[in-house]
Amino acid sequence: MKRNILITGGAGFIGSHVVRLFVKNYPEYNIFNMDKLTYAGNLANLTDIEEASNYHFLKEDICDYEKIRNIIAGNDIDGIIHLAAESHVDRSIKDPLVFAQTNVMGTLSLLQAAKETWNGNYDGKIFYHISTDEVYGTLDFDGTFFTEETAYDPHSPYSASKASSDHFVRAYHDTYGIPVIVTNCSNNYGPYQFPEKLIPLFINNIRHSRPLPVYGKGENVRDWLYVEDHARAIDLIFHKGKVGETYNIGGFNEWKNIDLIKVIIKTVDKLLGNPEGKSLSLITYVTDRAGHDLRYAIDSSKLKHELGWEPSLQFEEGIEKTVRWYLENQQWLDNVTSGEYEKYYEKMYKI
Ligand code: NAD
Ligand code: DAU
């Protein structure tokens, strides 16, 4: 079946994996990747599929309501997978306004444009919003999990903005009947993640023998999922998920930060041929992140039971694959940290 799908934020970390998967798996679809190309958006993440005849890139801001409306109407868009966002918690603490603008107002503009364009004809349409487990707040070390019924309790400006956007998405479903799905996922890791997030930042710092800043005592816990497993879940939910539903996505893979950091160090040292434990001395305990959530853990059993999804990769395999990718793609790391890629693609796409 022919479909015209708009993916927002497709030049970012998770978005690029989702775009790649859809372009490759569905040659009969038209895939429109709409991205503003902020510091986190990088078309070099998509060089392997940029020539595909079913792939179209649009450099646009999700806050630009009129443009989005024209894009949805002009391309007969019937599916929207919305990933574009400001995504880094530390940046949200320093500069919260842009998080409200992009994550709340941007999502609202998209919803309103979909509503106005689809104009009550919702047959075969879907607005799929990609969200985070951080909207649920924080857990204790008591073995409990976030479920789809857990009450929202966001603590950072980032998670507050994502919670707000989730509420708007559901409000458009309840008020106007827009067919929506929301998924809340745990921490992703893998290739093409901007090296401000823990795993790529630490790989990059070890490579340069720079300090590894561990917030607080390193005791906070995150639940890690390989990014391609998230992209597979998005594909499945987009096609088979029930309209109006929420699905949690997670790896049942909890790691205390300091333990994870030791695994990263061990893997990087091994692959660089360093003596075991060489980079442990780079660990530097620093002031804790303000409002730092203690523990995230996602119960994704609804997704498993209803749609049959499970993570495919064991963490040990995923982390080695990830470290290897960054070490084999050091130019990518250097480019995104220097900003060179922006100039290159500006020329290439005349933007
Ligand atoms: P990212 O920061 O790597 O990418 C975000 C992308 O959105 C970039 O390409 C950026 O250019 C684009 N963008 C930002 N503002 C825009 C705007 N105004 N208009 C158009 N495009 C804009 O983020 P990510 O880690 O890939 O996260 C993608 C989505 O998944 C986000 O909504 C995030 O909240 C959610 N999420 C992320 C994780 C994770 O671990 N990274 C986990 C769960 C959910
Ligand atoms: O849980 C899903 C969320 O995961 C996503 O919604 C966010 O977009 C994504 O950025 C991620 O948020 P976190 O804040 O959990 O990820 P980050 O990689 O920034 O940090 C992971 C943990 O490591 C967290 O407890 C803070 C800690 N940390 C992070 C950095 C960058 C450090 O100790 N030192 C650091 O330098």
Image (tube, rainbow, N blue to C red):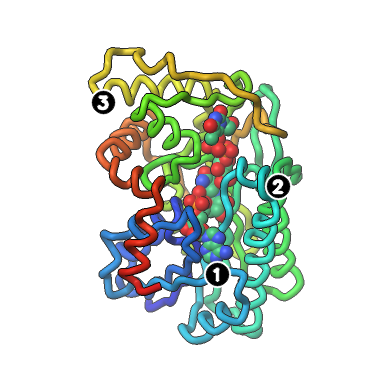
292 vs 208, left or right, is right
Observer-nearest residue: 254 or 46?
46
Q: Give the image quarter of residue 115.
A: bottom right
Residue picked out by circle 3: 271
Residue at screen point 33% across, 67% down: 26
Cβ at disc 3 under 8 Å from ligand 2: no
- Residue depicted at x 68% and y 43%: 93
Foreground residue among 178 and 272: 272
Residue annotated with mark 2: 157
Query: For the residue marked with disc 3, what is the amino acid?
Result: Leu
Q: CA distance from mark 1 to mark 2?
A: 21 Å
Q: How far apart, in angstroms, are the residues tagged by discs 3 and 2? A: 37 Å
| Residue 61: numbered disc | 1
As displayed, is residue 220 above or below residue 185? above
> Callout 3: few (<14), some (14-19), or many (20+) C-alpha neighbours within 10 Å?
few
Residue 287 sits above or below residue 64 on the image: above
Of mark 3 and mark 2, the one earlier in the sequence is 2
Q: Tell me which image quadrant ligand 2 sits in.
A: top right
